[in-house]
């Protein structure tokens, strides 16, 4: 997805990337609904705010320094400082689109990658330290890995393929989520009570909006309104469809009925898995990627549910495992005819090895750097909410609001109009009795 400097602006490419940027920006509020529906009602607003806050914290960090670290000319590990504070980023052509638009499109990826991590720590992380984490993680983890793959770094030199962020976004965020869940520890009632989703329709709405936005996520990564963009959009439609069918079948085999939460999760897993391959494989391969990706993530969620690991919303299983599977299957199914490099299935096992190196490097770096960031923040302020705040709910504790209440001031309730007063009727006996003193 790296863009090249120079060239001339192409109106069609610019128009498509403008639309795609808006679509990907919508994905972070969509993630808020997806995550928000899966938690208890007392933590719904806080969970959704953790996604919305990324729009501010990660977005500003990306503009000030993250973009430069990722895409300025530099060494194999990080870009230089040429674009700090957006220096040298204007309306000049970057490939066939304005440089500012390329910056903005890439920024929407940085925002949602940071927001994804929140799903592992909802219902127990303090909001202030979380904001600090968003900034530091965007600058020190996301931006360098983006440089490795898309900014001319060492993985790009090896020939690693990542069309729209399987490694850069999902493996990266999945590893960070796993480490964050381990560092913070489980919620105070973990293992003693079931954490039931409070609003499954919210989760389905979020999944649907994510699927919509993901067509811009993958299709826009062609950076042009061309056949590659069309291929990526079609693959983004087909792969989650296959994952959805496979997941419902697995649900039926295990419990006798498909679940709505499972269906929403399946859509996200399929989208994650096809992301690195979207512009490098054909439609039939996309169906295969989607169908195959269902099994490892499904089993990972089952395994997590029976362990002491409290990755609250299964970020590692959905995004981490899904991203790993998608990156490796890219090394199997990629075709030169679609603009990539032939994969292992077509006589080039080296690509699969390169993809494995990219996955392992991203996992190791993200895990190690995330651990250090969290420990650094913990030296300044506690990461965990108090037991009392967890019990009351983080909506009230950190935001002074509640998602669902009839309390005065929380939501505006229009009072019902009073029925008109009926005239008081005197008893019949009183009507019949003559008034005293009357002649």
Image (cartoon, rainbow, N blue to C red):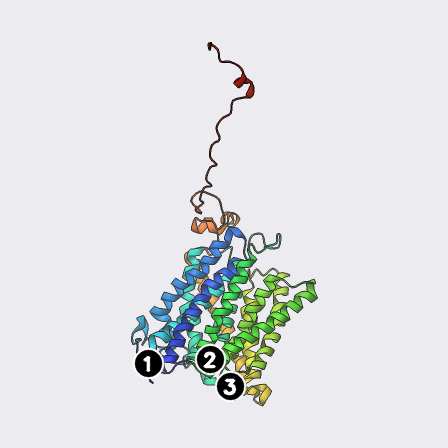
User: In the rendered view, would you say 435 is above or below 233?
Assistant: above
Residue at position x 48%, y 57% in the image:
47
User: In the rendered view, would you say 365 is above or below 407?
Assistant: below
Which quadrant of the view contains residue 5?
bottom left
Q: Which residue is mark 2?
A: 229
Q: Distance of mark 2 from mark 1, alpha carbons?
A: 19 Å
Q: Can you tell which of label 3 and label 2 is closer to the viewer?
A: 2
Q: Could you tell which of marks 3 and 2 lies nearer the N-terminus? A: 2
Left of 50 or right of it: where is 344? right
Q: Distance of mark 3 from mark 1, alpha carbons?
A: 26 Å
Q: Which residue is mark 1?
A: 93
Q: Secondary structure at mark 3?
A: helix
Residue 281 in sight in this render: yes
Left of 322 or right of it: where is 88? left
Camera-side residue of 74 and 16: 16
Q: Could you tell which of marks 3 and 1 lies nearer the N-terminus? A: 1
Estimate how packed mark 2 is, as few (under 14), some (14 to 19) or many (20 or more) residues with alpha carbons within 10 Å. Answer: many
Which quadrant of the view contains residue 74?
bottom left
Instruction: Residue lying at the far bottom in this picture: please name it.
Output: 347
- Where residue 338 is drawn, which disc sits there? 3
Q: Can you tell which of label 2 and label 1 is closer to the viewer?
A: 2
Horizontal and vertical percent position of residue 323: 54, 73
Horizontal and vertical percent position of residue 30: 48, 63
Tell whether label 1 touches label 2 (CB within 8 Å).
Answer: no
Residue 176 in sight in this render: no
- Where residue 418 is drawn, which disc sits there? none
């Amino acid at each position: 997805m790296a863009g090249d400097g120079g060239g001339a602006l192409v109106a069609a490419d610019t128009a498509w990337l403008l639309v795609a940027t808006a679509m990907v920006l919508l994905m972070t509020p969509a993630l808020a609904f997806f995550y928000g529906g899966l938690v208890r009602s007392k933590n719904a607003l806080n969970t959704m705010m953790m996604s919305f806050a990324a729009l501010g914290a990660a977005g500003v960090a990306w503009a000030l320094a993250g973009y430069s670290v990722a895409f300025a000319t530099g060494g194999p590990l990080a870009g230089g400082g040429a674009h700090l504070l957006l220096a040298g980023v204007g309306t000049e052509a970057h490939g066939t689109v304005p440089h500012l638009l390329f910056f903005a499109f890439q920024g929407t990826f940085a925002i949602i990658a940071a927001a994804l991590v929140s799903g592992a720590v909802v219902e127990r992380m303090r909001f202030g330290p979380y904001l600090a984490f968003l900034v530091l993680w965007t600058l020190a983890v996301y931006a360098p890995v983006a440089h490795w793959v898309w900014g001319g770094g060492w993985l790009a030199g090896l020939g690693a393929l990542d069309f729209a962020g399987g490694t850069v976004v999902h493996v990266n965020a999945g590893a960070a989520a796993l480490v964050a869940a381990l560092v913070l520890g489980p919620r105070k009632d973990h293992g003693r009570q079931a954490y039931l989703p409070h609003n499954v329709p919210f989760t389905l709405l979020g999944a649907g909006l994510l699927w919509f936005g993901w067509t811009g996520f993958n299709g826009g990564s062609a950076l042009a309104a061309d056949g590659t963009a069309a291929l990526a959009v079609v693959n983004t439609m087909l792969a989650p469809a296959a994952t959805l069918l496979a997941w419902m079948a697995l649900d039926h085999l295990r419990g006798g009925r498909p679940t709505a939460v499972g269906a929403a999760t399946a859509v996200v897993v399929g989208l994650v898995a096809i992301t690195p391959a979207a512009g490098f494989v054909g439609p039939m391969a996309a169906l295969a990627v989607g169908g195959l990706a269902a099994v490892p993530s499904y089993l990972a969620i089952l395994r997590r549910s029976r362990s002491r690991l409290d990755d609250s919303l299964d970020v590692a299983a959905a995004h981490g495992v899904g991203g790993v599977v998608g990156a490796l299957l890219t090394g199997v199914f990629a075709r030169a005819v679609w603009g990539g490099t032939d994969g292992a299935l077509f006589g080039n096992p080296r690509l699969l090895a390169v993809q494995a190196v990219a996955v392992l490097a991203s996992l190791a770096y993200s895990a190690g750097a995330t651990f250090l960031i969290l420990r650094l923040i913990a030296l300044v302020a506690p990461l965990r909410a108090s037991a009392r705040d967890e019990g009351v709910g983080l909506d009230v504790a950190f935001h002074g609001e509640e998602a669902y209440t009839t309390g005065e001031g929380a939501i505006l309730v229009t009072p019902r109009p009073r029925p008109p007063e009926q005239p008081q009727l005197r008893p019949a006996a009183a009507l019949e009795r003559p008034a005293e003193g009357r002649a």
